[in-house]
Amino acid sequence: MQTLQTGYRGLSLLVTLNWDRLLYAGAIAAALALGSVVGSL
């Protein structure tokens, strides 16, 4: 149980430190998807 808790705490720390990078990657993916939809019209 302690191993799971330590792993979760480490993953939470990584997400906290890198949330802006995840947001940028999501925004780029959304823009590419929207561009492909608009381009196919």
Image (cartoon, rainbow, N blue to C red):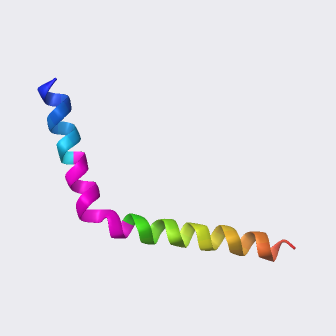
**Where on the picture, by quarter, is residue 34?**
bottom right
Question: Magenta residues, as a range?
Answer: 11-21
| Residue 4 higher or lower than 41, as above or below | above
The image position of residue 27, as x and y in percent, is 52, 71
**Residue 13 placement, left or right of 39:** left
Residue at the spot x=40%, y=64% of the render?
A: 22
Compared with residue 12, is residue 17 higher up or lower down, i.e. above or below?
below
* Image coordinates for residue 39, horizontal then vertical, percent: 80, 76
12 horizontally vs 21: left or right: left
- Quadrant location of the N terminus? top left
| Residue 23 location, quadrant | bottom left
Task: Residue 37: give x, y in percent of width and height.
Answer: 77, 69
Q: Quadrant of the C terminus?
A: bottom right
Q: Which residue ends up furthest to the top in the rendered image? A: 1
Is residue 11 found left or right of 30 in the rendered image? left
Identity of the residue drawn at 84% across and 71% down: 40
Give how far across and how far down residue 20 sits, in percent. Answer: 34, 70
Check if residue 13 falls in the magenta segment: yes
Q: Residue furthest right?
A: 41
Residue 27 in the figure: left or right of residue 38: left
Q: In the rendered view, tell whether residue 9 sits above or below residue 26.
A: above
Number of disc labels: 0
Secondary structure predominantly adopted by residues drawn in magenta: helix
The residue sitting at 23% across, 39% down in the picture is 8
